[in-house]
Image (cartoon, rainbow, N blue to C red):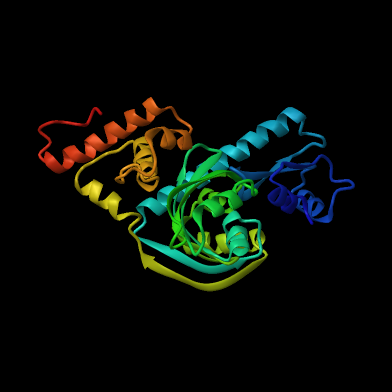
């Protein structure tokens, strides 16, 4: 395995300080260019490697420890830019490529828990909270939600889980699961894809993801083969794309929410804050988002006020632009 492949698989900078004694792949790539040293830099964002950058030097032992740290930071910066670009492409694309696969055989907490409990877990949405964590809202079928919350807590990449709604008589309910960025669902999002469907049923998952281009989707498929032990390809197709009907509606109403206002409102909605009786208190939603209750109320009030004002005052006589 060449050092470029090692850099991609381990997400670490790999350096050949001299042609002599290096592996065959690196030796050929350096010698062909008449260079004496090369660094392979993974372009990554939150653990997801989007590619590898090769940096060549004309002298041996050209890369110091400080140089390697700078290259590592450069790789993370470029990786973040790639992920941001893919997300923007997905947001504004009129058509997307949709990948449909069946997955099994991994440490994904939803898959392993659904297998252990012989139940169905359906992903409703995933909301980014920080650069290191996400909130996943999941519907439970054919199992008691409290037992599933207990079973999934402590699994790899699960930070916490709680029951939002429970119908023990019919073995159905909703969970809020706090995931680290090492979770497979989080890494799919970090890759720049949109999860349109994920159902884990007794250890087997049905996953549908959308990417802005066919090349991105094919790259995603190769990445899924590395992440899961068993991946069954079902379909790959281009379809018209509207990211969210709510986004379109808000655009039509000329509502401009800040990114944080959008995250707070979405999280509050899926956490059942707007339900009656409430399924989550403001304090619980704030704790899940790792912010204080006053901060939650601030963003929630501002965001909701913008939406309400757009409905009741579409002429904009009472401006909310400064909210």
* Quadrant occupied by the C terminus: top left
Judged left or right of residue 135, residue 311 is left
Q: Identify the residue at the far bottom of this view.
A: 234
Left or right of residue 161, residue 95 in this image: left
Residue 262 lies, in percent from the top left, at 35, 40
Residue under the point 17% across and 41% down: 310
Q: Single out the residue that lies furthest toward the right.
A: 21
Residue 236 in percent (x, y) is at 48, 71
Residue at image x 24%, y 47%? 251
Point out the image quarter for the N terminus: bottom right
Please name the residue shown 9% across and 33% down the image: 317
Asked if 127 appears above or below 61 in the picture, the reply is below
Res 61 → quadrant = top right
- Of 213 and 134, nearer the camera is 134
Residue 57 or residue 246, whichever sits in front = 246
* Horizontal arrangement in the rendering, residue 15 relative to residue 228 (left or right): right
- Residue 71 seen in render: yes
Question: Residue 20: percent from the left, percent from the top?
Answer: 88, 46
Q: From the viewer's perspective, is residue 62 above or below residue 234?
A: above
Residue 310's place in the image compared with 323, above or below, is: below
The spot of residue 217 in percent (x, y) is 51, 62
Q: Nearer the viewer, residue 106 or 322?
A: 106
């Amino acid at each position: 395995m060449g050092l470029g492949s090692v850099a991609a698989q381990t997400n670490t900078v790999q350096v050949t300080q001299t042609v002599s004694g290096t592996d065959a792949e690196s030796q050929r790539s350096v010698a062909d260019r008449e260079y004496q040293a090369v660094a392979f830099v993974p372009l990554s964002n939150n653990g997801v490697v989007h590619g590898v950058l090769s940096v060549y030097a004309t002298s041996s032992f050209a890369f110091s420890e400080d140089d390697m740290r700078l290259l590592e930071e450069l790789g993370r910066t470029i990786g973040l830019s790639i992920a941001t670009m893919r997300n923007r492409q997905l947001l504004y694309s009129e058509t997307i490529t949709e990948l449909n696969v069946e997955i099994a055989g991994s440490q994904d907490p939803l898959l392993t828990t659904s297998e252990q409990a012989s139940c169905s877990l359906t992903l409703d949405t995933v909301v980014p909270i920080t650069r290191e964590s996400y909130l996943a809202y999941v519907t439970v079928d054919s199992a008691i939600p409290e037992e599933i919350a207990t079973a999934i807590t402590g699994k790899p990449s699960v930070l916490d889980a709680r029951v939002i709604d429970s119908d023990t008589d019919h073995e159905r309910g909703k969970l809020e699961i706090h995931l680290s960025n090492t979770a497979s669902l989080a890494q799919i999002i970090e890759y720049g894809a949109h999860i349109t469907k994920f159902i884990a049923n007794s250890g087997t998952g049905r996953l549908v993801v959308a990417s802005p281009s066919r090349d991105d989707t094919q790259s995603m498929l190769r990445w899924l083969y590395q992440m899961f032990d068993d991946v069954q390809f079902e379909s790959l197709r281009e379809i018209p794309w509207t990211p969210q009907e709510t986004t379109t509606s808000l655009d039509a109403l000329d509502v401009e929410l800040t990114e944080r206002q959008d995250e707070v409102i979405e999280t509050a909605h899926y956490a059942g804050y707007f339900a009656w009786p409430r399924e989550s208190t403001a304090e619980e939603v704030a704790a899940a988002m790792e912010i204080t209750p006053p901060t939650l109320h601030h963003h929630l009030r501002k965001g909701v006020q913008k939406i309400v004002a757009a409905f009741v005052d579409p002429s904009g006589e009472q401006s909310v632009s400064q909210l």
